[in-house]
Amino acid sequence: MPAFSIIVPVYNRPEELNDLLDSLAVQTFKDFEVIIVDDGSEIKSEQLVSGYAKDFQVRYIYKENEGPGLARNAGAGQATGRWLLFLDSDCFLPVDYMEIVNRETASEDFDSFGGPDRPHHSFNVIQKAIGYAMSSVLTTGGIRGAAEKFDIFYPRSFNLGVRNSVFCSLNGFSSMRFGEDLDFSMRLLKKGYSSRLIKDAFVYHKRRKNLRAFFKQVYNSGIARINLELRHKGTLKLVHCLPTLFVLGHLAVLLASLCQPWLLLLLVPVPLIVFFHALRETKELHTACWAVPAVFTQNFGYGLGFLEALIVRKMLKQKEFQAFSKNFYK
């Protein structure tokens, strides 16, 4: 029985999966198995995965497309490790990642864990800018995993570990296509299980390659936040409403400026603050420049999705939904 079962859902991303598998092959701690779950891809990864059989124990599962949560469940159903470790296919690991995770879990005094994500120096400038937007303290990304003080720590599925027995007791992930990892973590904590942030167990997360794809992602994250509140009452916090207030505030200033053009000056401080903060954090001028549109894309995407879901779910009482279902990956 291996110490860890690493489960990775993949959908039409063999080139990104290759980077993750390469990073697993050079880990300093090797007591793990890898289960790749192909969620109905047109571009299959079976041949790629089989090439790593010499490096570690690996299995490939192909199933019909049902979303990442159910793909992870399929992988967990064949896992034999004491701990299940869920990673996204667009991540790859530092060479000592598994060694750090093994050391921290040796205490056996928590039931699940998560870690932060970072951009790698090899990423393109837009990926780095999006990485900044999704982890900065100036955005809601500040509560994603780099710090616990902003909110209860909920492990996210791009970097989430859980005891195999605990996962089974919770019946795994739900069928939600967005927010399924938060739904899982919320159910885990409600049942009295514990979670821990392992700050040193970070992954390199590629995220989206352009702002259009990023907008679709965060728009659905805004929708998911309302869906999660209706599933888990009381989990919606003021910080989750800030992007919508950001959108409404900017629209209000633009409308008011039709009568009072000087009001447009009120829109100047935010991009300047973002630029200089991103420059300090990334130390890259080009990335800091792109951080401004990335942060605005994040806030407008999340805020508009949140606002639509607020109307559709809370006011009109309609069922759960998602946006861009036909062209999300295009």
Image (tube, grey):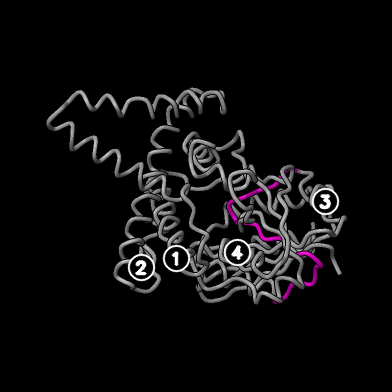
Indicate the position of residue 17 as horizontal and vertical percent values.
Answer: 61, 55
Q: Residues within 10 Å of mark 2 (few under 14, many from 20)?
A: some
Q: Which of disc 4 and disc 1 is earlier in sequence?
A: 4
- Amino acid type, residue under disc 2 in the picture: Arg
Instruction: Report the disc number at residue 313.
Output: 2
* SS for callout 1: helix
Which residue is label 3 attached to?
104
- Mark whose residue sits in front, 3 or 1: 1
The amino acid type, in three-letter code, at marker 1 is Asn
Q: Quadrant of residue 7?
A: bottom right
Give the residue at x 24% y 39%: 252
Helix, strand or loop at label 2? It is: helix
Q: In the image, what residue type sits under mark 4?
A: Met
Q: Are marks 2 and 1 in contact (CB under 8 Å)?
A: yes
Q: Which residues are magenta?
A: 77-94
Q: Which residue is mark 4?
A: 186
